[in-house]
Image (spheres, helix red, strand yellow):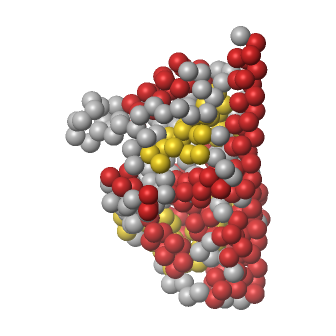
Amino acid sequence: MKIGYSFWGFLGNGITDTPDGGRSHRRPFIDALLARGHEIVFLQADRDRLEAGDDLDGAYTFDEGLPGIDALFLEWRWAIPGRNTTVCGSEGHTCDLHRQAQLINHYTARCQTPTVIWDKDRTLRAESVWRRTAHTRVCEATLAPTPGAHSLLFPVAEDLLAQADPLTLAARPRDLALGYVGNQYDRDEPFDCFFAPAAARVEHLVAGKWTKTGRWPHVHFAGRIPFEDAAGVYGRSLATVLMLPERYAAVGQMTQRIFEAVLAGCLPLTPADIRFADRFVPKEMVVRSGSDVLERLSYLREIVGTEQHAALIAACVDRLRLFGLCKQVNTLESVLHGLLQTTATERGAA
């Protein structure tokens, strides 16, 4: 089918000053859909070309008009005051929200085009009309989606899992006991509980946008780094702590950080209050306090480079199969096909 795909971010490395976490999984996801015979047309601005100067070899189609499509797929955008709620053309304005409104008004409301909303940031209101419209479906990147929504996790390509060699990763020199790549957004509580106490005792590094750090003077904040450098930080780090906003933790929405870390051989210590923590990581990686983090780091330092270390990495890689790309593409295709059948039946009845 021909899918109109709306996303605000990048397919390539993009630019450093952006919070777009979708770069770790968006392009493989799209390439897999293309490989299955679907036609994809992107309906937002080509930020790779316009902002990063990367035309990606012209491999993808962008259309800022309103082309004919069989289905609309939205990576859901939300209001960010001072950024996408301002007047078009004003300083600092981004037009993602206005464009999304145009797409929904034209395709979803007027043309009743089958529409799938991927609420990746959990910002679509529970009472939203799009949760109860016959020709729309909502997907969430969580193991416990909102009633009526479908679980569509952030995907990781199976070939990356196959290429991850635990013995090689365990043998890699690591000068940091603890590393983290990601932004501050709503993570102060788990940072206070799990990361900051350990950072006072071990070599560490935090990369990302952290603007309010006065309460942690002992923590080494490196600021934002280029997207492609994240693997280097994890490649230097023995372990990381998976820190989630409460709205993610409560429903088992794990971010792409888990496979960015594990594929670099960085072991993901996971707070026990994250729902389904033991599905994301082996029980040895689940922690309940900052002292737990220090205890696990001490143990990991004892076994670094050994077969035990490699076995832990292998177990973490195995857990990533939950996010397998083929499984997530199957989910989206199933949702789309069911939606198309429902829409066709309704149109026939009318």
Q: Quadrant of the C terminus?
A: top right
Q: Residue at x 54, y 84 (%)?
A: 174
Q: Can residue 20 be seen from the camera position used here?
A: no
Q: Residue at x 46, y 40 (%)?
A: 43
Viewer-closest of 139 and 144: 139
Q: Residue at x 50, y 84 (%)?
A: 175
Side of 200 relative to 332 (left or right): left
Viewer-closest of 298 and 322: 322
Tell me residue 197's x, y (percent): 52, 66
Side of 270 relative to 44 (left or right): right
The image quarter containing residue 4 is top right
Tell me residue 347's x, y (percent): 70, 17
Side of 20 relative to 305 (left or right): left
The image shows residue 146, relative to residue 215, as above or below, that is above
Q: Quadrant of the N terminus?
A: top right
The image quarter containing residue 150 is top right
Tell me residue 325's x, y (percent): 69, 57
